Amino acid sequence: MVDQAGREAAAFGGIFGQDAMEAAHKALERMMADIAGPVLGQDAVAAQSGLVREVSRLMAGQSDLKPEAGDKRFTDPMWKDNPLFQAWMQGYLLWSKSVDALAGAMGMDELAVKRNRFFANLVTDALSPTNTMLGNPAAMKKFVETGGKSTLDGLQNFLKDMVDNGGMPAQVDKSAFAVGRNLAMTKGAVVFRNEMIELIQYTPVTEEVYETPVLFVPSMINKYYVLDLAPGRSMFEYALAQGIQVFTISWKNPTAAESEWGIDNYLEQILNASAAVREITGSPQVHLAAVCAAGMLTSSVAGFLATRGDNQIRSSTTIVTGLDNAVEDTKLTIFTGPDMVEMIAGISQAQGVLDGRNLSSAFTWMRPNDLVWNYWVNNYLMGNPPPAFDILYWNSDATRMPARTHREFLDQGLINAFTKPGAVKVFGTPIDMAEVKCDTYVMGGLTDHICPWKNSYSGARLYGGKTEFVLVGSGHVQSMVNPPGNPKSSYYVNSGLPESADEWLKSATKKQGSYWEHWAPWIIARSGD
């Protein structure tokens, strides 16, 4: 059973998309069949006994079951004020809780339990009463208020998504955005180009600039402009205003023809870009600043240059990057065993590339209530258009990754390679993060569900030089796009790097504002005149 569950779960790392719920249903069916069999132990018996007691309280109208903190599905007053709706909600919560408990009590290995619980929760989330018209008081009210027009609008949205969005509820109104119209508006020009990259130099806005420029390196699976969204929400724009010279790489979107591009090809292009930046500016050094998975690339470059005694990197910034993936699990890590890696790599190998839309779907299904069913309700039951939000547009503007690069990343992740000196090889040369002596600035996101902040923190402790770790109080993308002026923005700083991430946070100082206001002075202090 475990092997079969694993094969279906592999959809999350490679194909995912519309197969997810079918895989979840099958996994749940097997799990429920096993519940009736001999695999359950004493924990399952206890779980069933607790279920019986809670059912009795529910039948007597004495249940005190409530949604968990942060669960926004049952916020309408009717779920509390109407006895029928309250009983419906509590019955659903009890059922969800019991399915999760039984999945957790199954007498299998820990990884298989996590997989089955994940799939079980996918199904229970999908079957929430709030995802139906009769079970959603707000949708019913709007139906009455609009004379049924909201339902017709919802049907139109549904049909449009079936055609244009692979049957998934659209998260963003794409018609509201266009690169060059209201996104990626910071003035600049392409100053270097080859078969893999374009190098963009942004136009300075101050009379004088600091000597050492910053070369930003975006993730290969997303577009470069995440740090150059709308005016006023652009990190590039902010850095330029501080007198910092800004360059960024824009990766070519590969096709199956480039399936053999590997990690070394990407590392070579970072070195090419660094050489071009230094030639253009006359600076002997550059600051590298990388986002998400690109932080593994820039760390590899830094490690390689360290083996050669090359000090062209003045400092390294990594933003929501996890060099150590073993400290805190994400929901995706339960699908990264050797059997999974082989299947996932085989999928991208057959296609020649990993399509970024599939990876985006995997991240979406990690938080189905927020990123799937929330939009199901908004778009279809309420009949509203999807929101116009620049971050969500960028997230939907995915690219591809060559199959070889994908396989090499999977292999690195399988052995947690960056934590093992010599396990990562660059152009055939083993590297060790402890030999990276340049100053490093590592940023994590407190509520990041893709790269947990404790993984970022542990990765920060791998470098051999002086490291500054900063924790932003937001999620994955919101931590990156964090302009000054938001009264809700905050971040944590701590001059020490104790072994425990919890210990670091306990003794950290909370600052109001944007980490950009902390990062820019850090860069400037290392940028010469």
Image (spheres, rainbow, N blue to C red):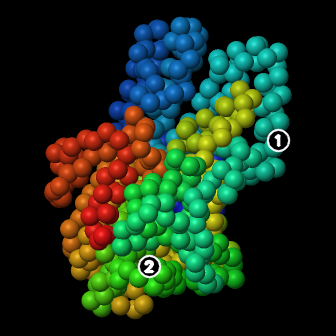
Of residues 379 and 326, the one nearer the viewer is: 379
Residue 281 disc label: 2
Q: Which image quarter: residue 440?
A: bottom left
Give me the disc on residue 159: 1
Few, some or many residues within 10 Å of mark 1 (<14, 14–19, 20+): few
Is 8 drawn above or below residue 271 in the view shown?
above
The reply to whether callout 2 and callout 1 are in contact (CB within 8 Å) is: no
Where is residue 248 shown, x and y percent of the image? 51, 69
Q: Tell me which residue sits at (79%, 26%) in the image.
A: 151
Residue 108 to residue 296: above or below: above
332 vs 113, nearest the viewer: 332
Residue 224: tell me if it is visible. Answer: yes
- x and y percent of residue 291 in the render? 45, 63
Residue 161, placed above or below residue 239: above
Give the residue type that dot 1 points to.
Leu
Q: Is residue 189 above or below residue 89?
A: below
Helix or strand or loop: what does disc 2 sit on?
A: helix
Circle on res. 261: none
Between 379 and 215, the one nearer to me in the picture: 215
Residue 163 horizontal side relative to residue 412, left or right: right
Assign the C terminus to one quadrant of the image: bottom left
Q: Residue at x 29, y 60 (%)?
A: 522
Of callouts 2 and 1, which one flags the residue occurring earlier in the amino acid sequence?
Answer: 1
For label 1, the SS is helix
> Where does the image place residue 39, in percent across and percent down from the top left?
43, 48
Give the amino acid at mark 2.
Answer: Thr
Tell me the residue at 56%/49% (across/down): 231
Residue 458 x/y as whole percent: 27, 61
Number of the front mark, 2 or 1: 2
Residue at the spot x=35%, y=50% of the render?
517
Label 2 to label 1: alpha-carbon separation: 52 Å
Does the image show residue 307? Answer: no
